[in-house]
Amino acid sequence: MTHLPNQWLLRTALILLLIVPVTTYAAKPVAVRRADVIIYGGTCAAVTAAVQVKKMGKSVLVVSPDKHLGGLSAGGLGFTDTGNKEVIGGLSREFYQRLYQHYQQDSSWKWQKREEYGNKGQGTPAIDGNSRTMWIFEPHAAEKIFEDLVKENAITVYRNEWLDRSAKGVTKKAGAITSFRTLSGQVYEGKMFIDVTYEGDLMAAAGVKYHVGREANSVYGETWNGVQPNVFQHGHYFKTNISPYKTPGDPKSGLLPEIATSGPGEKGAGDNKIQAYCFRMCFSNNPDNRVPFPKPANYDPARYELLGRVFDSGWRETFQKFDPIPNRKTDTNNHGPFSSDYIGKNYDYPDATYERRKEIIRDHQLYQQGLLYFMANDPRVPEDVRKDMAQWGLAKDEFTDNNNWPHQIYVREARRMRGVFVMKEADALGQTNVPDPIGMGSYALDAHNAQRYVRSDGFVQNEGDIGVHPKQPYSIAYGSILPKESECKNLLVPVCVSSSHIAYGSIRMEPVFMILGQSAATAAVLSIDNNVSPQQLPYAKLRDVLLKDRQRLTL
């Protein structure tokens, strides 16, 4: 009998569990943010696309994994790859006109007088008074203009928002994206979506087919695609015989760092390799605005022995791509056989997880920091080179929240969509009339090295560097920013465009991304207005608006 009260309590509790609902605490409600057009990415194309949507009277949200807007245009690439600047129109041209206005102000010349700067650009004057454009600029000046455009057009930007790339990240219905989710739990819902990332993450998550690597020449009837051993169209190759082995001439001693163990492959064959990445560096030679090159963690000078042997051979082109930008600064790019391009270390980047990409980017940074420290300090480097390097350091007033290091790695190529129309070598060389043009390009077919290997004669060489100039500017087809309709009916892709590897070598220029971003946004808004998919939008309607907005479509 003494146990009855406990039994009664237990029975009563069981009954209550059956008849009284248990209180559950649901997870925090998911926020849904809506707009007519959702733009994913923070590149220069994100800004021009968003501005265009607003100008056409629709609502837009920019969902950016990046804190800083502008991608490479605000990330160190200030010595603009223009090609023929006359084909750069619309909002892209306005960006460079705003830079002109910026540098007309005396206050913009803090470290240098305007008349001391000179006027050297890449195939064009840096400051073009006739067209009131400025093609050469400092990173912070570019970023300010992108932010001004966002503010003036009241564009809402959500930063540090990373697409959930899992199977639940993108929701589709009847072949169209209805929304996507970010890692923070936010949901973005729209009628049209534009992927402006360098990587094409939204495109891939939406189930759109794409390619990574170099196609064989046989795929599209090309000449300069695929593996290209013994093709040297820039100065980025070993001009003299240099041993790749730790003990020169002795294979048993093992390879020096940064050299692949396999050969280059068959000429013209396809592979999964992509052109090298690097950081475009902003240096200063003003002692009051200069930070010494830092010694990176785990610095190992042995990594750069190959460069030491290049110097031993008499090579002295070290400073040929210290291109001057205003205020005694540079846009310093890769140059020579062993330079800032971290060859062969990015093959898995396009499809890698966010964590793996961070590792790759960090590895590139440590490599490049070590290279700079080596060149400025190591006795293995000739004294004349060290003396000249001592004049330079990181620009103190650039990338101030990132220890003066660029916040954007140069993703020269990642995924490339397989869309409605594939831009090919002949198209990018100006040899064809592409259908339904939405913008133009004119730069050379420019691919950087994809691998460094040991030749059959036992010496080291690079492979993949191509520079073939088009005979004239060329048009870019509307179909190259469109997925096949069976794969996605409301997505446009103006950065990871549908293109072969070698054609992308020309298309991949920042002014072109701004042009295509604007054209993609125009198509998105017109598709909403006409209640059709972008693939079904009558081209004549698109062309009329593009021309009204001063886009250059044909010669």
Image (tube, grey):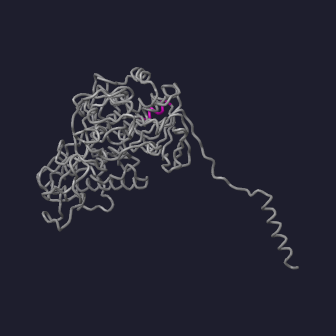
Q: Position of residue 90 (x, y in %)?
A: 38, 26
Q: Nearer the viewer, residue 434 or 87?
A: 434
Q: Nearer the viewer, residue 69 or 86?
A: 86
Task: Say whether residue 149 is magenta.
Answer: yes
Which SS does the magenta portion mostly show?
Answer: helix
**Residue 321 appearing in the image:** yes
Task: Say whether residue 247 is magenta.
Answer: no
> Where's the C terminus, which quadrant?
top left
Q: Nearer the viewer, residue 30 or 538?
A: 538
Name the image quarter holding residue 121: top left
Tell me if 467 is positioned left or right of 436 in this view: left
Does 222 sit above or below residue 315? above
**Residue 288 appearing in the image:** no
Does 74 sit above or below residue 237? above
* Image mark count: 0
Does 189 sit above or below residue 475? below
Toward the right, the furthest residue is 1
Name the image quarter holding residue 254: bottom left
Residues in magenta? Answer: 146-153
Q: Position of residue 528 (x, y in %)?
A: 52, 28
Name the image quarter holding residue 383: bottom left
Q: Residue at x 63, y 47 (%)?
A: 29
> Where's the N terminus, which quadrant?
bottom right
Q: Position of residue 10 (x, y in %)?
A: 81, 70
